[in-house]
Amino acid sequence: MAIREIIKLPHKTLRRKAHKVEKFDADLRKLIKDMVETMRDEPGVGLAAPQINISQRLIVVEYAEDDNDPDSPTKLFAVANPELTYMSDEKVAGIEGCLSVPNLVGEVERSQSVVVKGQNKYGKDITIEASGWLARIFQHEIDHLNGVLFVDLATKLYQPEEMPEGESV
């Protein structure tokens, strides 16, 4: 495994629609391991392949049920060719940041719940139902695959030290 360099705005790969994953082989599984290691090293809760300058429709997401409890179990997802097949009409505003947009956070409205369909590292079809924070992470990472960044959707942007009192990323 290796930690990969995360590219930053205005890098052109971040603005391109990523290519479909076609080969589910040892190279893809190594890329997934590298992405997980890179995400954890930052630390982040999600990473899309374009963020490491690889134009493939691949994301990794790691989610803890209770962010405030260091012993809370985490779930790790690696999804190739993810698609949002359902997005609830109920929207929730929340603060987001991004490893590719350092020193900036923003308030973004997202669907409260989603269904993600894609493929696992072996090419097998998977479906994930997510709500709350996990749904937000999936929407953020899938946006990366379409060249969309949270700054494009944010209603307000802040330097982290300027955030409203009581808010956190």
Image: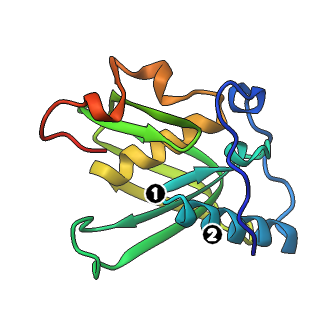
- Nearest the eye: 141 or 40: 40
Colour mode?
Answer: rainbow
Identify which residue, 68 or 74, lies in the foreground: 68
What is the secondary structure assignment of the residue under circle 2? Answer: helix
State the image coordinates of residue 135 (x, y, percent, origin top left): 37, 48
In the rendered view, would you say 112 is above or below 155? below
Q: Name the residue under label 2.
A: 37
Q: Quadrant of residue 83?
A: top right
Look at label 1 and name its amino acid: Val
Tell me if mark 1 has few (under 14), some (14-19) or many (20+) residues whose alpha carbon lies within 10 angstroms of its own: many
* Residue 88 can be seen in this image: no
Q: Are marks 1 and 2 in contact (CB under 8 Å)?
A: no
**Residue 61, x across and y down, in percent:** 51, 59
Disc 2: CA contacts within 10 A as few (<14), some (14-19) or many (>=20): some
**Residue placed under numbered mark 1 in the picture:** 45
Q: Report the side of 135 relative to 166 (left or right).
A: right
Residue 91, compared with residue 26, is above or below; it is above
Q: Is residue 162 left or right of residue 159?
A: left
Residue 145, position as x, y percentages in the image: 65, 38
Image point (56%, 41%), residue name: 142
Q: Residue at 12% x, 41% y: name it.
A: 166
Residue 9 quadrant: top right
> Where's the C terminus, which quadrant?
top left
Q: Residue 98 carries which label?
A: none
Which quarter of the rendering shows the N terminus? bottom right
In-front residue for pair 23/154: 154
* Residue 62 percent across, percent down from the top left: 46, 64
Q: The disc labelled 2 sits on which kind of residue? A: Glu
Residue occupying image coordinates x 54% and y 58%? 42
Q: How far is the residue under mark 1 from the one under mark 2? A: 11 Å
Q: Of helix, strand and loop, which one carries label 1?
A: loop
